[in-house]
Image: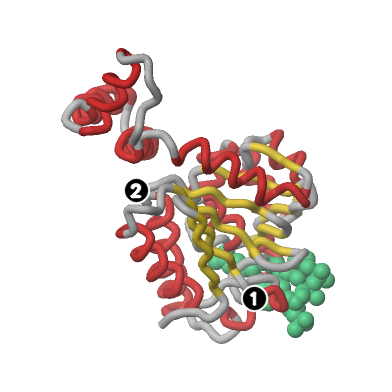
Amino acid sequence: MTDANLLLEKDGPLATIIFNNPKALNALTVATFCGLEKLLNELEQDAAVRVVILTGAGEKAFIAGGDIGHLGNLDADGAREFALLAQRVINQIETFPKPVIAAINGYALGGGCELAMGCDLRIAADSAKFGQPEVKLGIIPGFAGTQRLARLVGKGRAKELVFTGEMIDAAEAFRIGLVNRVVAKEKLLEEARVLAFKMCDKSASAIKLAKEAIDNGLEMDFARAARYEADLFALCFTTADCKEGISAFLEKRPAKF
Ligand code: CAA
């Protein structure tokens, strides 16, 4: 199943996926997740693509959550299935072998905030709003938001957001570490692209291994994680990028990865 409400734009090494159902504030459906999974599979294989940006169409929302109309039709088994599908695709973003940047142009609520948290970096428009409002619907976050939010901003702040269901603005999201930076709304995509291009001319193999070191290492105790880092560091020395990067430095020329 694919989703007509997903757009893909390519600009050299940069791919932008746009959630494009602004009338429903880009709410996430089963079809959206299936379509996203398919697009990510394609972009993973496309060697020309170095960085992926995710953003929302329209003035108001990045993604205002899971589709509440769909949630209304679910029984417990259906709800688990929906949650596991969403978790699988958000995991795919998190373990994607290239950087994924969320450019958050408006509401990032419920499943929208959960999806943004699966990205490597989050840039927010100054007008963006964040929240986990599920308790207002008598449910809890189901796309691994309880876990990623607590890991990103700490247990106390995560509980405050999840228990109250209240929204916070972009400045507060920045203050608590939920987003990396906040920019003027009209500059959001431009700034996201500038940041992405800073990664595009670096070693893709090194960035991939750095991502694995940070994400997988954080799930281990420190000593094991440091050892894991040393193994990945060693792996770098088997790559062409390592030879090129170090030769370029010694020959006083820009590296060409
Ligand atoms: N699902 C389905 N439709 C949604 C939606 C959602 N999550 N959020 C907004 N919409 C729809 C509205 O129903 C409305 O549709 P109609 O024009 O057909 O009535 C349209 O988008 C525009 O929304 P509003 O008129 O409500 O816009 P607003 O500016 O007055 O309010 C808002 C904006 C505060 C974001 C409000 O829409 C809202 O509270 N949305 C729901 C947010 C929410 O609860 N998200 C969590 C969903 S649960 C979840 O995500 C599950 C999970 O983690 C597993």
What amino acid does circle 2 point to? Pro
The foreground one among 108 and 207 is 207
Determine crowd level at label 1: few under 14, some 14-19, many 20+ residues with C-alpha closer than 10 A: some
Residue 21: which disc? 1
Q: How many marks?
A: 2
The kind of secondary structure element at disc 1 is loop
Q: Is residue 221 above or below residue 120?
A: above
Q: Position of residue 182 (x, y in %)?
A: 71, 40
Residue 97: which disc? 2
- Which residue lies at the image location 54% right of the left edge and 73% below the top edge? 6
Q: Position of residue 230 (x, y in %)?
A: 24, 23
Residue 246: which disc? none
> Quadrant location of residue 23?
bottom right
Q: Position of residue 104 (x, y in %)?
A: 66, 53
Q: Is residue 152 above or below residue 77?
A: above
The foreground one among 129 and 78 is 129
- Which residue lies at the image location 19% right of the left edge and 30% below the top edge? 235
> Quadrant location of residue 105?
bottom right
Residue 165 vs residue 192: left or right? right
Quadrant of ligand 1: it is: bottom right
* Ligand 1 lies under 8 Å from the Cβ of mark 2: no
Quarter containing the C terminus: top left
Determine crowd level at label 2: few under 14, some 14-19, many 20+ residues with C-alpha closer than 10 A: some
The kind of secondary structure element at disc 2 is loop
